[in-house]
Amino acid sequence: MNAIISPTTTMSRTDAEARVIHTESSAPKPMMTLRNVSKGYGSGATRNEVLKGINMNLRDGEFLAVVGFSGSGKTTLTQLLAGLIRPDSGEITMNEEVVTGPSPDRGLVFQNYSLLPWLTVRGNIALSVDRVFRHWSRAQRHEHVDKFIEMVGLTHAVHRRPHELSGGMRQRVSLARTLAMKPKVLLLDEPLSALDALTRSVMQDEILKIWEEERQTCLMITNDVDEAILVADRIVPLNPGPSANLGPAFTVELDRPRNKTELNHNERFKQLRNAVTNYLVAVRQKSRRDEAAQSTQVRIDRPNISPKDLSLSGRTQL
Ligand SMILES: Nc1ncnc2c1ncn2[C@@H]1O[C@H](COP(=O)(O)OP(=O)(O)OP(=O)(O)O)[C@@H](O)[C@H]1O
């Protein structure tokens, strides 16, 4: 395997906690750290172990992409990072402080835009800005909202309500609302997956442009390997569940600013795409084999009951 496409850091193994600290000691300071984090839902026979023993560093100022299959626990991972849910075991820290709940320091953009339908574009963004920057003057807040509406190219639609916007425009509002709160960490949970291919492509470029201006610490969840390579400094695969953990990190050594059309002809890009895709296909095949082996091993215990009398005397015979 070519050096540029070798996974660089083992992110999650049962003994990974010590290894993460050891292998990443020379890397930039982590902004967020997950140590041996596990999370499941339900109890008893219906218990679903979603994530198990996750170890990860989100470094200060980096763009990290987590790629994985549907249902592997990607949203669970972002919700844990955002502080919306708590791990069953293990610890999540931000700047070495344990995350115990949501905070404006961690801005989350969802797949569905969650805009308030009765508010305009400006109103939706201003609501968050007024809450986070209540100590600013009215004029300051107004100017701040304007700046982010302009950044996502919605100045012409500032007075429209969500139902008057296309899917791409709604996602722009959602992005502007989160960016305007100036979070230290931006968490993007498949923000583009509900959009058509063309709008998705335009939005990828916009997210990239904004990130290149702001250089905020960012984690993006996606199921699209090309998208991950386009935006990220590192790509971490989330292995298929149940009890999903993280695969090895792939470093994206491609110059910035990145141009999608040029990347299509770039050998490094193609090799990296193959390496990440091959990894994902291999872990999925392994997970299916393990599942199949497990299901053939399931033993059915029949009840130990012997009939006392099988005669049908005294009953109607059919
Ligand atoms: N609140 C919940 N209660 C019970 N089970 C849940 C809950 N949230 C998620 N799950 C289950 O956990 C597993 C992982 O879900 P999650 O949404 O994290 O995966 P995902 O990788 O984001 O999926 P997708 O790509 O389809 O959005 C799924 O089996 C899901 O049904």
Image (spheres, rainbow, N blue to C red):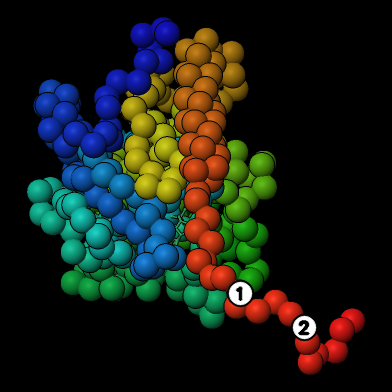
| Residue at left offset 18%, top offset 58% | 99
Pick the residue in front: 36 or 66.
Answer: 36
Front-most of residues 218 and 150: 218
Q: Do the CB atoms of the residues marked 2 and 1 lie less than 8 Å apart? A: no
298 relative to 224, above or below: below
In this rendering, position of residue 163 left or right of residue 66: right
Q: What's under tag 1, amino acid-wise?
A: Pro
The furthest residue to the bottom: 314
Q: CA distance from mark 2 to mark 1?
A: 13 Å
Q: Position of residue 310 (x, y in %)?
A: 70, 77
Q: Is residue 132 above or below residue 290?
A: below
Q: Does 3 appear above or below 244?
A: above
Q: Residues within 10 Å of mark 1 (few under 14, many from 20)?
A: few
Residue at 50% from the left image edge and 49% from the top image edge = 298
Residue underneath mark 2: 312
| Mark 2 or 1, nearer chain start | 1
Residue that carries the numbered disc 1 in the rendered image:
307
Q: Residue 79 versus residue 118: which sits nearer the camera? A: 79
Pinpoint residue 30: horizontal percent, then vertical percent: 17, 38
Whether residue 168 is visible, yes or no, is yes
Label 1, secondary structure: give it.
loop
- What x and y, as percent, mark residue 190? 49, 49
Query: Is the distance from the Cβ of mark 2 to the nearest ligand 1 atom less than 8 Å?
Result: no
Q: Residue 315 appears at what percent x and percent y?
A: 80, 90
Q: Is residue 44 left or right of residue 172?
A: left
At label 2, the amino acid type is Leu
The extreme right residue here reads: 318
The residue depicted at 37 percent of the width and 24 percent of the height is: 250
The answer to which quarter of the image holds residue 317 is: bottom right
Q: Which residue: 54% across, 80% down?
A: 118
